[in-house]
Image: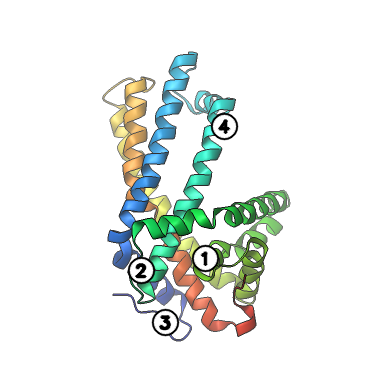
């Protein structure tokens, strides 16, 4: 059972805390993750049906990329990404309430928090993405900035920080702890990638029983991935929250998030 730490911990302990948060809060997070999986499923089904309606092939990486470049698909994908940001915030708020020993958030309250702070999260995400992408053109600056600003969702959904304040709070909390931050978050991302690899293996086996380009098989493979999302989606917010709690114990009061 997770207990909120009272002093900074080593990397291994922070990762263990992330696992404990995930396990302790999964039952409450599952309905929110299911909504995320359903939104992904809706997009996936639309993409397959759109490709079929437009007569576009969907049986290779190159042809799939062509489908995803179509304006209707891009528009719906952006909308789904915004919804996923709100659900990510709902997961963070739910996990924070339970891991802090407070009363569990009702589903409607958690969703209200996620969507209520969505505007500032979208703004912070847009800044984060733009600066990181530009930095990635020079490789190292992008990696550096992407890491020091990575805690902004926790600042927004745990401490109710504004968009710009959340980025600054993340920068201050990670100051002097770059490798600590990168290693813990890397463990969370690695867990997601391992599950994705297992799913890809299952999807590959599924493709052996039918035509790889058939709409039915494509839909089945996409929906299988959406089911996996129910278990995958709470992993990153749990990791982010465990790291955020740890770094706040290392930082002076003025480094903590504010509106």
- Along the viewing direction, whichever of 233 and 115 lies nearer the viewer: 115
Q: Which residue is mark 4?
A: 74
Position of 175 with respect to 55 (left or right) is: right
Which residue is located at x 51 percent, y 51 percent?
85
The picture places residue 12, in percent across and down from the top left corner, at 42, 74
Q: The N terminus lies in which quarter of the figure?
A: bottom left
Task: Provide the secondary structure element on which disc 3 rests.
Answer: loop
Give left or right: position of 47 versus 198.
right
The structure residue drawn at horizontal position 57% and vertical position 32%, both measured from the top left corner, is 74
Residue receiving disc 2 = 21
Residue for badge 1: 154
Disc 3 crowd rating (10 Å Cα; few below 14, some 14-19, many 20+) is some
Of marks 1 and 2, which one's residue comes earlier in the chain? 2
Secondary structure type for disc 4: helix
Q: Is residue 216 above or below residue 22?
A: above
The local secondary structure at tag 1 comes to: helix
Of mark 2 and mark 3, the one earlier in the sequence is: 3
Q: Residues within 10 Å of mark 4 (few under 14, many from 20)?
A: some
Q: Which residue is mark 3?
A: 5
Residue 175 visible? The answer is: yes
Mark nearest the camera among 1 and 2 is: 1
């Amino acid at each position: 059972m997770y207990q909120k730490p009272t002093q900074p911990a080593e990397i291994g302990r922070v990762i263990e805390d992330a696992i404990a948060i995930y396990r302790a809060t999964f039952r409450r997070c599952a309905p929110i993750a299911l909504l995320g999986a359903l939104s992904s499923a809706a997009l996936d089904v639309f993409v397959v049906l759109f490709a079929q309606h437009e007569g576009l092939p969907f049986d290779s990486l190159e042809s799939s990329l062509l489908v995803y470049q179509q304006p209707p698909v891009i528009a719906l994908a952006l909308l789904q990404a915004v919804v996923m940001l709100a659900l990510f915030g709902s997961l963070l708020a739910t996990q924070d309430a339970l891991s802090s020993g407070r009363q569990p958030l009702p589903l409607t309250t958690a969703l209200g928090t996620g969507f209520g702070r969505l505007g500032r999260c979208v703004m912070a995400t847009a800044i984060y993405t733009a600066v990181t992408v530009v930095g990635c053109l020079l490789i190292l600056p992008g990696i550096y900035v992407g890491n020091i600003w990575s805690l902004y969702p926790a600042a927004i959904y745990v401490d109710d920080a504004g968009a710009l304040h959340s980025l600054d709070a993340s920068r201050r909390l990670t100051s002097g702890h770059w490798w600590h931050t990168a290693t813990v978050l890397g463990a969370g991302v690695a867990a997601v990638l391992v599950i994705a690899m297992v799913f890809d293996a299952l999807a590959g086996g599924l493709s052996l029983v039918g035509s790889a380009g058939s709409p039915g098989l494509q839909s089945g493979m996409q929906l299988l991935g959406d089911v996996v999302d129910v278990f995958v989606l709470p992993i990153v917010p749990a990791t982010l929250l465990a790291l955020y709690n740890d770094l706040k114990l290392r930082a002076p009061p003025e480094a903590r998030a504010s509106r």
